[in-house]
Image (cartoon, coloured by chain):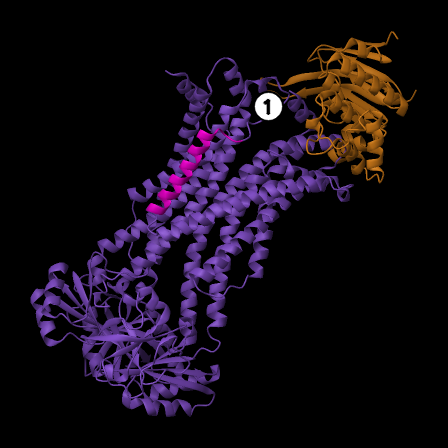
Chain colours: A purple, B orange
């Protein structure tokens, strides 16, 4: 057996003593990544396994505010069993006051619904019989939330549009819920015939239809349909990706959370590195003795690498058990709270990835102290104190460290699923490392200098604290790095979250309308304006014709094949609102090209939003084809307008000349500015006069959006907590190491006559100062990161939040103080004689 | 001569992995003010432990310890620390300087703890007295062993203690440096009128004391006036 193997195995006999923090840091980091990855995998498997239920069929084609034509429907019926589902927003009216109306997302179904899975009603019962026409009244089932809000019970008569319905039950489960797009209100299900009778699916009304087919192959079906109806303009979905919206959110959030977990692993790496450095420091004399009796530097390096590698393997395994096990245990509880289906289990890919990240991180952070072993000279045996090997490793080892760092970053970017985001996060973490390292170096130098300043004479406690912060080989570096990274990420998340909430709550409502009204028919437009204008405290009313269309071609190239900036992907996903106008709309400006003459009636022209045009590669003179109601409309881009989407006014990506769209049936939308006191009268008046018109109260939607953001923030904060826990483990490790030094200091100070409270005060001061320093640096880089993300990713204004700053700095000081104090009691309680005897020995 | 230290049947037992170890087995001792007591004996005889008990750094398991008129058994940790701060100086074989403080700051620390406003002037005076007035700003790691022990001696004597306890102060130094440190210690203790209790292995240093206590196996085997 080679010597290095013997050495490694012999050292392993020493057990895990001195490696507790090492194991904890690695296990927490790997566990966090494994847990998040396992949840994402569970959701992906859940979506895939329940693809048919979620989609409502084997394949589905969707149309915007039209039904399939008779030939289209007949063609589909020949392919398999078909279910037709309509979707729209409307007002559910329980009669009485404005408070008895609620914006709901209505689903109209036929007798075949659902083709897969089953809808469940609270208290049991069959959906189809609940919806059936009885005594001339259609049935309606609704989300329990809206039933409770309106204070109604089964048997109550409610109104949707111009139709009366009977509430026949509360919806407990909707099989295809996850495939729904952004819901503006709670779900209500009725028969499509009931909606038709209520006049809610007339021409110009904003609704969508989906035709789900059971027992068909998507590719064959799509090819056949598109060749039979080339201009149908349908959107296709199949079971491989039944809920693209939900999947995108899960993928993106999952990637972000995994990256937060990786940041936790990086923080853990600091603890891992410090633990190895401390361990090897304690082994200095053993290693020097081995060198003296002829062991080669390479053999020693290999032996200790074996030992530390084996312990790292144990830490990674513990992390996988922790992360994978936690998800298995918490799975049933998580499944209930997730809006998408999830199948919890042990998935190899996220666990393998977590293990790979863990191994690379452990290798990266242990290689540096291990590499310095080569530089250890046997002469240390003959010195008074056995110092840890310091300085830079030789160039080859340094190259290996850099190579490992690159491999780690490349692996993260390649496997995260969001390369851009991963690059940003790894860049931010690397920048955070650099800033914190520099800050720790600066703090040490500053503390050393300050400790000897004449102004600190007669303050031995403070001088001692500053001396310890500035001491070479002290814990300042690891505390500032671990706490600084952890608090920095928390600070960044806190600042981004606070700014998003501020923008939604404070900025948007100022100058924003109180209501959006949709589905106002052409003949209702003037009476609607007159009615609203007559209500007290109502301000500006804006209206615009509105229809929806799908962009199918850019400059003649099918949208699916066109090259464009991914930021503009939303323009080509699903259908977009369109309008027409003879003149330049109020408040709009043209920055390229010209607006068409008032009486223009030539080939179709379109005015396009400037930023999105650039991202799609469109300019004045380009052509764009939009499918409106199953008919392709190709228009030339006549001009470009800057559009501010955050303003909540009426904004359209595309404005056509009137004659291009005049023939298409359409409704109008309106925005109404009103004082809060006028909101109830507006709701009441419009409900009575225009039952088919849907009122969307901005304040309610802002609250809903704000709540959704809070939920998102909560998920992010949980992930950040994993990072924070790892940071705490590093702090505990650092405090434990510092306690060894403090034991000696406390003994000497007692000999010199210092009371325990005075010694404790000095220890508290150094821990608090170090923590506050880490908090301060974290605040600076966390705020800088939040500023960058808010301004350049979210495109919002940024205002630093004072409370968050205070919490971060005070939190840093308090946490390090707690960790420090937890370890300070032992040094204080030890009798000086024993400590000094030991130190002398 | 009034008694500065009075020990009655002192016993000290310390726990170890192999079981309790009896370190001191019934020591009776009286040391008068101004005495220079040298404690000698083989390694493990209990010399240093006896010194630690006198300094209140170790608590006797049994017996009565009276130092400077105070019963140390009745004093708490902080009261013991105050007693050392105001009346005692201690010098160790391993110096035990605070590594993050300069020589001047190390010497000034006990004076600062006693809230002396002249702490740094007095510290500078003491460094000059031990011949290190050119080393004020040096850290312990930048000083030789002999220099570190001079700083430790200056630190112990700076508050003007009535009792100086020295535990093998020359044990880590070569004979020439050790002799110089011993000279300095005897001279300064005499100048300040401090009572000196010194543990040493070096017979030539013990001979400079007024009284020599020899210990063996935790007991006093001989207590005699020095020949000089």
**Which of the pair A175/A620 is nearer the observer?**
A620
Residue A539 appears at what percent x and percent y?
45, 86
**Badge 1 is on which residue?**
A386
Q: Is residue A134 above or below residue A413?
A: below
| Mark 1, secondary structure of its residue | loop
Residue drawn at x 45%, y 54% is A717
Taking A605 as reference, is A228 above or below it? above
Residue nearest the viewer, comparing B25 with A394: A394
Left or right relative to A234: residue A294: right
In what quadrant of the picture does the N terminus of chain A appear? top left
Q: Position of residue B47 (x, y in %)?
A: 74, 16
For this view, does A840 lie left or right of residue A426? Answer: right
- Quarter of the picture containing the C terminus of chain A is top right
Identify which residue is drawn at 49% across, 39% down: A270
Side (left or right) of A328 relative to B178 = left
Please indicate, yes or no, whether residue B208 appears anywhere in the rendered image.
yes
Can residue A97 be seen here? The reply is no
Location of residue B23 in the rendering, given as x and y in whole percent from the top left corner = 69, 17
Q: In the rendered structure, the residue with mark 1 lies on which chain? A: A
Query: Is the residue marked by circle 1 packed among few (<14), some (14-19), or many (20+) residues within 10 Å?
Result: some
* Highlighted magenta segment, given as a residue range: A392-414
Residue farthest along the right direction in this orientation: B1
In x, y percent, where is residue A220?
11, 60
Number of numbered tags placed on the structure image: 1
Residue A395 magenta: yes
Quarter where residue B94 is shown: top right
Q: Is residue A398 magenta?
A: yes
């Amino acid at each position: 057996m080679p010597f290095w193997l013997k050495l490694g195995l012999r050292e392993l006999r020493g057990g895990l003593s001195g490696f507790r923090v090492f194991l904890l840091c690695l296990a927490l980091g790997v566990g966090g990544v494994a847990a998040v990855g396992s949840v994402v995998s569970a959701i992906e498997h859940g979506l895939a396994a329940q693809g048919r239920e979620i989609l409502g069929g084997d394949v589905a084609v969707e149309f915007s505010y039209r039904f399939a034509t008779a030939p289209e429907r007949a063609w589909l019926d020949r392919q398999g069993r078909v279910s037709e589902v309509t979707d729209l927003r409307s007002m559910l009216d329980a009669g009485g006051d404005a408070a008895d109306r609620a914006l709901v997302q209505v689903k109209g179904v036929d007798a075949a619904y659902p083709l897969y899975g089953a809808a469940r009603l609270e208290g049991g019962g069959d959906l189809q019989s609940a919806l059936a026409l009885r005594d001339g009244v259609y049935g309606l089932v609704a989300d329990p939330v809206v039933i409770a809000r309106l204070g109604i019970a089964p048997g109550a008569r409610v109104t949707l549009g111009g139709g009366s319905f009977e509430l026949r039950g509360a919806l407990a489960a909707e099989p295809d819920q996850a495939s729904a797009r952004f819901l503006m209100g709670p779900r209500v299900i009725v028969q499509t015939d009931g909606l038709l009778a209520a006049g809610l699916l007339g021409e110009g009304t904003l609704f969508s239809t989906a035709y789900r087919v059971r027992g068909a192959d998507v590719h064959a079906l799509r090819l056949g349909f598109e060749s039979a109806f080339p201009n149908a303009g349908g959107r296709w979905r199949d079971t491989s990706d039944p809920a693209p919206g939900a999947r995108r959110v899960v993928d993106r959030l999952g990637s972000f959370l995994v990256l937060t977990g990786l940041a936790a692993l990086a923080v853990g790496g600091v603890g891992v590195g410090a633990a190895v450095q401390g361990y090897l420091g304690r082994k200095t004399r053993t290693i020097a003795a081995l060198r003296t009796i002829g062991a080669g530097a390479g053999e020693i390096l290999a032996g200790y690498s074996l030992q530390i590698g084996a312990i790292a393997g144990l830490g990674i395994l513990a992390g996988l058990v922790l992360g994978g096990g936690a998800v298995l245990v918490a799975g049933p509880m998580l499944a209930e709270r997730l809006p998408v289906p999830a199948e919890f289990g042990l998935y190899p890919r996220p666990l393998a990835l977590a293990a790979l990240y863990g191994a690379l991180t452990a290798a990266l952070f242990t290689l540096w102290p291990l590499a310095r072993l080569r530089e250890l000279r046997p002469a240390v045996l003959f010195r008074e104190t056995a110092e840890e090997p310091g300085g830079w490793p030789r160039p080859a080892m340094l190259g290996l460290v850099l190579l490992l760092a690159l491999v780690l970053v490349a692996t993260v970017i390649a496997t995260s699923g969001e390369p851009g985001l991963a690059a940003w996060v790894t860049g931010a973490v690397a920048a955070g490392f650099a800033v914190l390292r520099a800050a720790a170096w600066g703090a040490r130098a500053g503390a050393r200098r300050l400790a000897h300043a004449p102004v600190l004479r007669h303050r031995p406690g403070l001088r001692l604290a500053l001396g310890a912060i500035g001491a070479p080989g002290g814990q300042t570096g690891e505390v500032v790095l671990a706490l600084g990274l952890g608090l920095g990420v928390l600070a960044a998340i806190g600042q981004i979250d606070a700014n998003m909430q501020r923008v939604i709550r404070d900025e948007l409502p100022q100058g924003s309308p109180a209501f959006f009204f949709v589905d106002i028919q052409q003949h209702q437009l003037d009476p609607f304006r007159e009615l609203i204008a007559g209500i007290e405290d109502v301000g500006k009313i804006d209206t615009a014709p509105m229809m929806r269309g799908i962009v199918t071609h850019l400059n003649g190239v099918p949208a699916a094949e066109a090259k464009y900036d991914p930021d503009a992907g939303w323009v080509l996903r699903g259908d977009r609102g369109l309008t027409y106008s003879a003149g330049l709309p109020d408040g709009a400006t043209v920055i390229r090209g010209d607006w068409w003459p008032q009486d223009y009636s030539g080939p179709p022209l379109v005015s396009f939003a400037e930023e999105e045009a650039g991202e799609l590669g469109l300019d004045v003179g380009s052509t764009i084809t939009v499918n409106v109601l199953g008919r392709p409309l190709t228009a030339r881009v006549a001009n470009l307008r800057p559009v501010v989407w955050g303003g909540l006014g009426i904004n359209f990506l595309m404005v056509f000349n009137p004659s291009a769209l005049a023939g298409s049936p359409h409704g109008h939308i309106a925005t109404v500015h009103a004082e809060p006191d006028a909101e109830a009268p507006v709701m009441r008046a419009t409900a009575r006069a225009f039952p088919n018109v849907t009122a969307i109260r901005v304040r309610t939607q802002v609250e809903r959006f704000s709540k959704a953001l809070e939920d998102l923030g909560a998920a992010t904060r949980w992930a950040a907590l994993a990072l924070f826990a790892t940071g705490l483990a590093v702090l505990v490790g650092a405090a434990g190491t510092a306690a060894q030094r403090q034991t000696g200091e406390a003994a000497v100070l007692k000999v010199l006559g210092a009371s325990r409270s005075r010694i404790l005060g000095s220890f508290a001061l150094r821990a608090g100062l170090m923590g506050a320093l880490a908090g301060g640096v974290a605040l600076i880089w966390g705020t800088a990161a939040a500023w960058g993300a808010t301004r350049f990713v979210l495109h919002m204004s940024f205002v630093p939040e004072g409370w968050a700053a205070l919490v971060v700095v005070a939190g840093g000081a308090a946490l390090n103080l707690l960790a420090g104090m937890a370890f300070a009691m032992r040094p204080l309680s030890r009798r000086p004689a024993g400590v000094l005897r030991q130190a002398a020995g | 001569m009034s008694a500065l230290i009075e020990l009655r049947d002192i016993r000290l037992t310390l726990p170890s992995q192999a079981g309790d170890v009896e370190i001191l087995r019934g020591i009776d001792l009286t040391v008068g003010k101004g005495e220079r007591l040298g404690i000698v004996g083989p390694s493990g005889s209990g010399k240093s432990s006896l010194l630690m008990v006198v300094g209140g750094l170790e608590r006797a398991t049994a017996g009565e310890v009276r130092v400077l008129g105070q019963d140390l058994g009745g004093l708490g940790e902080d009261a013991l620390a105050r007693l050392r701060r105001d009346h005692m100086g201690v010098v160790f074989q391993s110096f035990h300087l605070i590594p993050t403080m300069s020589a001047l700051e190390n010497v000034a620390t006990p004076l600062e703890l006693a809230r002396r406003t002249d702490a740094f002037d007095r510290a500078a005076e003491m460094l000059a007295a031990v011949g290190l007035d050119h080393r004020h700003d040096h850290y312990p790691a930048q000083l030789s062993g002999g220099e570190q022990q001079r700083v430790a001696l200056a630190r112990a004597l700076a508050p003007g203690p009535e009792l100086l306890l020295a535990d093998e102060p020359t044990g880590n130094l070569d004979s020439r440096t050790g002799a110089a440190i011993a000279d300095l210690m005897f001279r300064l203790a005499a100048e300040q009128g401090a009572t000196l209790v010194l543990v040493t292995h070096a017979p030539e240093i013990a001979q400079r004391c007024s009284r020599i206590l020899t210990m063996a196996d935790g007991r006093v085997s001989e207590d005699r006036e020095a020949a000089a």
